[in-house]
Amino acid sequence: MRALVLATLITSLTAGAQVTDTQLEQPPGQDWLHYNGDYESTRFSTLDQITRGNIGSLVNKWTFHVPGPGGLESVPVVVGGVMYVTQPNAIYAIDGKSGRLIWTYHHLLVKVKDREGPHRGAAVFKDRVYFTTTDDYLFALDAASGNVLWQAKIAETDDGYSSPAAPLIAKGKVIVGISPGDRGLNGFLDAYDAETGKRVWRYEPIPHPGQPGSESWAGDSWEHAGGDTWLTGSYDPELNLLFWGIGNPSPDFNGDVRAGDNLYTECIVALDLETGKMKWYFQFTPHDTMDWDAVEIPILVDAPFNGKTRKLLVQADRNGFYYVLDRVTGEFLHGRQFERSQNWTSGLDAKGRPQRLPGKDPTLTGVKICPSSIGATNWMSPTYDPDTHWFYFVALEGCGIATMNTEKFRPGGYQYRAGGDVLLKDDTWKVSVRALELTSGRQMWETPRVGSTNLGGGLVSTKGGIIFSGESPGEFVALDPKSGQVLWHYNTGQEINAQPMTYMVDGKQYVAIEANSDVFGFALFETQKPGK
Amino acid sequence: MKRWRFAFVLGFGSLLSANGQTPPKNPVGHGSEVVAAGRAAFNRMCTGCHGVDGGEGERAPALVGDRRFFRLSEGALYDTIENGIPGTGMMAMGKAIDDGDVWRIVVFIRAMRGSASDTDVQGDAQHGKEIFAGKGGCIKCHTLQGKGGTIGPDLSNVGAEMTLKHLRDSLTSDTPIARGYKPVTVVLINGQTIKGVAKNEDAFSLQLLDYDNHLHLIDKEEVQKEDEGTKSLMPHDYDKQLSKEEFQDLLAMLAKQTREGGHKRIDGDGEVGR
């Protein structure tokens, strides 16, 4: 038995060095290869060692301290037991069994200005690991040693760009997004050749004059228009389409200077992986004036809808609505309000377009708008459990007093928000984890997150019948997917703003989450043997 | 000692601001001959306080460190030597040392502190690259600009990260094994032998990179025997393995290795203080 374990150890680690396209298309099991676990972003793991029955024995097995300022927001990826963790401008390879460091690579910056975070994670392909930096480089490193194989410049930091998102790798292309859209910088999404680092295509969500959608921008407002790509999207290998959420228009709060729908901000866009050409789009919030980036993670599920199995894309948007789209065509199938307190629209029409209520745009003196600019949800990853057929996400009930001003665009990376909102963190401000029925959006349960007004981290679901949830006050919690009941919790002692993930090494399932400046690894308790 | 260094920094900072003039420019140039002449002048005039080669001072800071407050531009260094630092033991040496020698000392100090890439290293870098990949055998263990072995450190930014002295010493002296590169041979309980370098280790686990670039995550309880190498895998006799010309070309090539956009860990030019 021992020999078998050792054989498994050696072969699994050797095999882990090479990540193939086929592996990237599998649901997460032993390895966790994507920011959101799989191309479909379901964050549903096939691992079932940790169950409702034994979760009381889940214990912290190791902790890895990440030196630096803390505030970790990334998701580790794991290949063959080796975990790759990032913080801004640094990546760490960690032994997934012991939490011990294997190697680290720090990208040293030239200017203080280059230091803006956060960072959300790495991607893996073949024997390489990829990550971006706050000064807009994409790095390819040798996964075993951390040696740099190539680096590519994505954007100019002096303009104000940074690159926080975890890359997504599909069929030899490394897809990387850009941030922020709050400085009047037009966003883009790039594809780089994973082998050479050469840029293959660039998709620009803001149309230039004469291009389709340009009529949705008044005058020359398209020039400083936002529309960034700061969160990782999803991918359908069969359709060969990427699905990416596009951020807010600029200036965020003054819509008067950019009359029109402001395409393709606040959209989910479907892009051909080979060319970067847009196949379809759906806009959640035309002419947004509340900074409700539509970058929230789209989950891809094939499921019956009105009696027919369809390729669906579901997304809980920051504007307070849950959407069900046909991901082949972009057709709006269904939408449902999930934020009870929303007050900016009377609802969605037959095509999913929100019917705006008058007087619900920011003014010079201030207007109460719900949700606030934080949104009814945000970058906290949702999850879909195919056993319950429910969609789980982190929701926020909360409003803000929104004002606008006439701030002008200034080059050099300065804020171009032209307003803001005062968050009304009173008794009505509530954070919770919610379960929605996949196709109807009907709420099945809601479990509050207590002790903080911050949203906290995201979710992961498992075949073992558990949902793991990282809460802002530092509690790492396991929930029953059918009822939302708390099954287990562990106080990390630090604020959590990251998404959990799970993996297996040598037959043992681990669950990991980052909390402030540490990574915690959990597994079922087993008695330690005396040392040699 | 700390207080003395602090005074050195503050004093120099105030001198600069009081002076407010553009620092004079170096009239003696750079290059190995200037550095050698500067070293001789330094050891004639400065060792009483700063120690031989600026290595260890009895009454003043050692000058060979790479602390940030030592990263002074040529003009600022010249000013310090010429005019001293008021309120500290650093005297104005302008009248005691020939102006040309002051500049040569400046070049010597910067050559000690500056990164190798900042230093004018004679040699044919292109030929050095050939030595790296060929006769020197370096590429078997080291990555250079994305190509090469992984058992040794990536040298793609080594010119920015090391002083020239450190770089030369690593090629010619038996220096301590760097963390993450200790050679190990492990025999597991099942009889399997794995050889490589220990990327990390404690009493309970070992993270080993083998010579085929595979990582092994090993529980110590599965280890029957572990042999740790006491010598670095890095040969330290390149000055003997290679001809004088080949060695110099290799050194010149390595000194030029910097990564695009990468910060120099050791920077000859910089502000006083943090």
Image: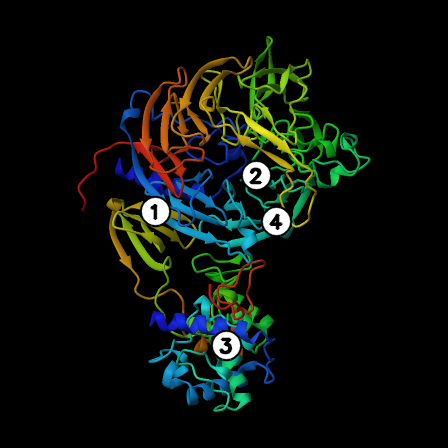
Q: Which residue is mark 3?
A: B111
Q: Nearer the viewer, mark 3 or mark 1?
A: 3
Chain ID, mark 1: A
Query: Quick check: A175 above or below B105?
Result: above
As measured in the structure, the alpha-carbon distance from the residue carrying label 4 to the one carrying label 2 is 12 Å
Q: Quadrant of residue A421?
A: top right
> x%, y% of residue B194?
34, 52
Q: Is residue A493 visible?
A: yes
Q: Residue A197: which disc?
A: 4
| B34 relative to A459 in the view: left or right | right
As measured in the structure, the alpha-carbon distance from the residue carrying label 3 to the one carrying label 1 is 38 Å
Query: In the image, what residue occupies the spot 63% across and 18% down?
Result: A345
Q: Residue A100: which disc?
A: 1
Q: Quadrant of residue A40?
A: top right
Chain ID, mark 2: A
Chain ID, mark 4: A
In terms of secondary structure, where does tag 3 sit?
helix
In terms of secondary structure, where does tag 2 sit?
strand
> x%, y% of residue B97?
49, 90
Q: Which residue is mark 2?
A: A169
As measured in the structure, the alpha-carbon distance from the residue carrying label 2 to the one carrying label 1 is 27 Å
